[in-house]
Amino acid sequence: MQTKRSGNSRFPFCGCFEPEPTRRDFLAAASCTLVAALVASGINVESAPLLQFDTTRPISEQGTELFFALAGGDKVSMDPDNQIILIRQANRIMAFSLGCPHQNAALQWRSQDRRFQCPLHGAKFQADGNLQSGPATRAMDRFALRLDKGRVVVDIDKLYRSDQQKADWDSAMITLEEKTPR
Ligand code: FES
């Protein structure tokens, strides 16, 4: 099962470990995440606005659940300590594992392409985490999440694979109610 990662966690590459990632590395990876969410949501990526991204950390924790502030608008946020990427886009929120589903390298965001890409072997993923091209053979893994009193709650003990838990993977998404204009 997925366990919480320590603040000193490192990104493994093919069984090895990278040097401690810098804040810049995390920001780059977060940027990649944003693009994937756009594509998955059926948004025209070419015309979609670039999303802001930043780093974040839980407001609080309870057991295996981490509570994050709900982003005020569309953006990508990365929690480097827990290796979680949060995306809010088009009223949808998803939480991904930062690790590539191939060999767990830290994924990067390619803002110009509006997608994620793995720096190790080049796998590409859409903004919603769906696989675009290998060598990875499945989508980015998604954490179970829910909304609670305006907070996004991510369960780090429930990480779903698209090839083994498709129904859970598909439903690992929060859809916010759209406000009807008056
Ligand atoms: S680790 Fe091989 S494609 Fe990502």
Image: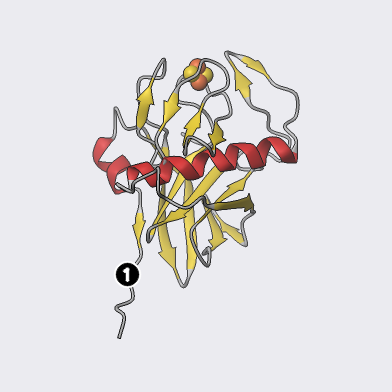
| Residue 168 located left or right of residue 146 | left
For the C terminus, the quadrant is: bottom left
Q: For this rendering, which residue is in front, 60 or 13?
A: 13
Instruction: Name the residue: 41% across, 45% down.
Output: 37
Instruction: Name the residue: 38% across, 58% down.
Output: 90
Does residue 103 appear in the picture of this structure? no
User: Seen from this angle, which residue lies furthest front?
Assistant: 47
Place of residue 34 in the rendered image (x, y in percent of width and height, measured from the top left): 49, 45
Under mark 1, the amino acid is Glu
Q: Quadrant of residue 136?
A: top left
Q: Quadrant of residue 92?
A: bottom left
Neighbours of disc 1 within 10 Å: few (<14), some (14-19), many (20+): few
Place of residue 126 in the rendered image (x, y in percent of width and height, measured from the top left): 39, 36
Does residue 88 appear in the picture of this structure? yes
Relative to 80, does residue 146 appear above or below in the rendering? Answer: below
Place of residue 114 in the rendered image (x, y in percent of width and height, measured from the top left): 47, 39
Judging by the rendered image, the residue that carries numbered circle 1 is: 177
Relative to 43, does residue 83 appear above or below in the rendering? Answer: above
| Residue 18 located left or right of residue 4 | right
Place of residue 101 in the rendered image (x, y in percent of width and height, measured from the top left): 45, 25
Instruction: Name the residue: 75% across, 35% down.
Output: 22
Q: For this rendering, which residue is in front, 40 or 105?
A: 40
Relative to 142, does residue 121 appear above or below in the rendering? Answer: above
Give the structural element (helix, strand or loop) at label 1: loop
